[in-house]
Amino acid sequence: MGSRSALAQHSAASAQVTRIKCFPYYVDMNVTLSLDEKLVKEARKIAVEQDTTLTNLIREHLQHLVESSSSTGRRRREREALERSFAKFQIAVGGRKWKREDLHARS
């Protein structure tokens, strides 16, 4: 009867485990770069002048690069969507075919 009790406890524990939601987690990732020694020395000098680390300089640059790329991509997608809607509704956007005098008739 002892083994049945252990089996029941194991089954109950297994059931609880399956009810736990798994969420993705993010950790910092180490990346190895091959850089010229002179470049690294100069970059470290800049980092010291800015009271930061070489790692932080690289991290900030990559973050800026990603943000710039994302916003540029979003603008491109929005422009393409606008152009598609113009084509769909056959709206011609281009040079004007009127003169100022035509709009502001003066007597």
Image (cartoon, rainbow, N blue to C red):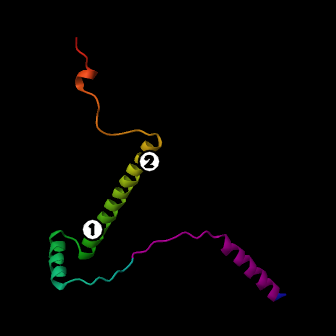
Q: Is residue 20 magenta?
A: yes
**Residue 14 on image: x %, y %:** 70, 78
Residue drawn at the location 19% of the way across and 84% of the way down: 36
Please, is residue 90 above or below residue 32 in the view? above
Residue drawn at the location 67% of the way across and 73% of the way down: 18
Q: 13 or 32: nearer the eye? A: 32
Q: Is residue 53 magenta?
A: no
Q: 38 or 84: nearer the eye? A: 84
Which residue is identified by label 1?
61
Which residue is identified by label 2?
84
Using the rendered view, name the quadrant where residue 28 is placed: bottom left
Residue numbers of the magenta segment: 3-28
Near mark 1 (Cα within 10 A), the count class, few <14, some 14-19 or many ≥20, is few
Q: Amino acid at mark 2?
A: Arg
Residue drawn at the location 30% of the way across and 71% of the way down: 59
- Quarter of the rendering occupied by the C terminus: top left
Using the rendered view, name the quadrant where residue 93 is placed: top left
| Extreme-top residue of the structure | 107
Please, is residue 59 above or below residue 38 in the view? above
Q: Amino acid at mark 1?
A: His
**Residue 17 on image: x %, y %:** 66, 75
